[in-house]
């Protein structure tokens, strides 16, 4: 059975590129352009992993993360951002994100973190 990823990012190029990248690796990928749309799709369910940007219009990533964790505390989430601010990293970790990557994200790093999340869910 294919693993299902929800990818939330306000940059269309990043969304489309990562969607194709992970679909080529046999994942099912749904995309959302902001935190509000991301949370609506998340509530419809069935995602093995959420990969989200931090700074987006309508709802920032930490708020999306908080709402996801309130809904499903064991949901695996990877956050990405161009902001290299320790307070944001600490807030995301405190809210329960598994990994935090700074943009520009190296694909090898992102793929490694995704694999790590799935290997943790298998145990």
Image (cartoon, helix red, strand yellow):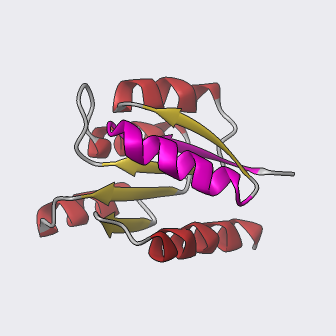
Percent x, y of residue 52: 40, 48
Q: Which residues are magenta?
A: 3-25
Quadrant position of residue 82: bottom left
Residue 67, above or below 93: above
Report the side of 123 relative to 34 (left or right). Answer: right
Magenta run includes residue 13: yes
The mark tally for this picture is 0
Percent x, y of residue 5: 61, 47
Report the side of 119 relative to 79 (left or right). Answer: right
122 vs 11, nearest the viewer: 11
Q: Identify the residue at image location x=57%, y=66%.
A: 114
Q: Identify the residue at image location x=32%, y=36%.
A: 10
Regarding residue 94, the answer to whether it shows in the image is yes
Percent x, y of residue 50: 52, 48
Percent x, y of residue 75: 56, 51
66 vs 77, nearest the viewer: 77
Regarding residue 96, the answer to whether it shows in the image is no
Report the side of 117 relative to 107 (left or right). Answer: right
Q: Identify the residue at image location x=76%, y=55%.
A: 26
Q: Quadrant of the C terminus?
A: bottom right
Report the side of 27 relative to 41 (left or right). Answer: right
Q: Identify the residue at image location x=22%, y=66%.
A: 90
Magenta run includes residue 41: no
């Amino acid at each position: 059975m294919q693993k299902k990823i929800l990818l939330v990012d306000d940059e269309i190029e990043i969304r489309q590129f990562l969607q194709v990248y992970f679909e080529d690796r046999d994942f099912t990928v749904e995309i959302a352009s902001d935190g509000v749309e991301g949370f609506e799709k998340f509530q419809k369910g069935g995602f093995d992993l959420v990969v989200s940007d931090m700074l987006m219009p309508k709802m920032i990533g930490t708020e999306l993360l908080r709402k996801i964790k309130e809904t499903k505390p064991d949901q695996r989430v990877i956050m990405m951002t161009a902001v290299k601010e320790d307070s944001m990293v600490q807030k995301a970790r405190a809210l329960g994100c598994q990994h935090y990557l700074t943009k520009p994200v190296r694909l090898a790093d992102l793929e490694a973190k995704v694999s790590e999340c799935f290997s943790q869910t298998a145990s």
